[in-house]
Image: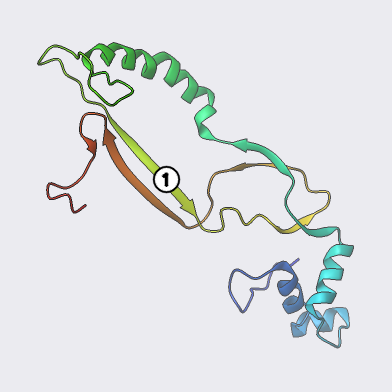
């Protein structure tokens, strides 16, 4: 275990590189009678003998907040009922994007929808050193740095943009 020591090279190091570095510290070498620095290949053998494997983690169930009981309750008992209530005040559109007969003047409700895409750094980089007996864990969306692209759209007006359409 690497407690009590900090990597001199910062984050992003592989476990095998951390093991090589850890076993090269003077106090660790002295405590364990180590005379030479080990190679990364030897570190891989050590990790394997400790039960770690370079592999994909065991897949658990996908975990998403959209299905939590409070969210489902809100959708079923509040949001959908309110949406049905304002539905008659909104324009309906055909498959050919033509407006159908709509609400009476003055009763028109315009719905704006938020469209969002999120890209996470290393979102699909799942391979790493995992212990062979480690249990499968539920995983959730995105961890780490992200890029979010968002916009608003309405069936009445299209994509929200600046008056000069530059943005």
Q: Quadrant of residue 102?
A: top left
Residue at the extreme left: 106
- Quick check: 52 left or right of 127? right
Q: How are the residues colored?
A: rainbow
**In the depicted structure, whether residue 159 falls above or below residue 78:** below
Q: Secondary structure at mark 1?
A: strand
Q: Position of residue 164 (x, y in %)?
A: 12, 50
Residue at 60 percent across and 78 percent down: it is 9
* Mark 1 crowd level (few <14, some 14–19, many ≥20, 10 Å Cα): few
- Quick check: 80 left or right of 61? left
- Quick check: 48 left or right of 153? right
Residue at 18 percent across and 54 percent down: it is 166
**In the depicted structure, whether residue 100 falls above or below residue 2:** above
Residue at 70 percent across and 39 percent down: it is 60
Residue bearing mark 1 = 117
- Quick check: 98 left or right of 71? left
Q: Position of residue 94 (x, y in %)?
A: 30, 20
Residue at 72 percent across and 74 percent down: it is 17
Nearer-the-camera pick, 80 or 12: 80
Nearer-the-camera pick, 106 or 159: 159
Q: Quadrant of residue 48?
A: bottom right
Q: Position of residue 11 (x, y in %)?
A: 59, 69
């Amino acid at each position: 275990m690497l407690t009590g020591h900090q990597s001199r090279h910062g984050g992003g190091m592989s476990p095998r590189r951390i093991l090589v570095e850890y076993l090269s510290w003077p106090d660790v070498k002295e405590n364990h009678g180590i005379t030479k620095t080990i190679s990364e290949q030897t570190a891989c053998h050590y990790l394997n003998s400790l039960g770690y494997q370079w592999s994909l983690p065991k897949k658990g169930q996908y975990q998403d907040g959209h299905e939590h009981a409070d969210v489902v309750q809100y959708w079923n008992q509040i949001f959908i009922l309110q949406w049905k209530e304002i539905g008659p005040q909104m324009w309906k559109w055909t498959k050919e994007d033509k407006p159908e007969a709509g609400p009476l003047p003055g009763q028109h409700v315009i719905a704006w929808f938020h469209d969002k895409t999120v890209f996470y750094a290393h979102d699909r980089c799942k391979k790493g050193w995992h212990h062979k007996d480690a249990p499968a864990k539920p995983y959730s969306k995105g961890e780490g740095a992200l890029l979010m692209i968002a916009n608003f759209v309405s069936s009445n007006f299209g994509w929200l943009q600046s008056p000069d359409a530059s943005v």
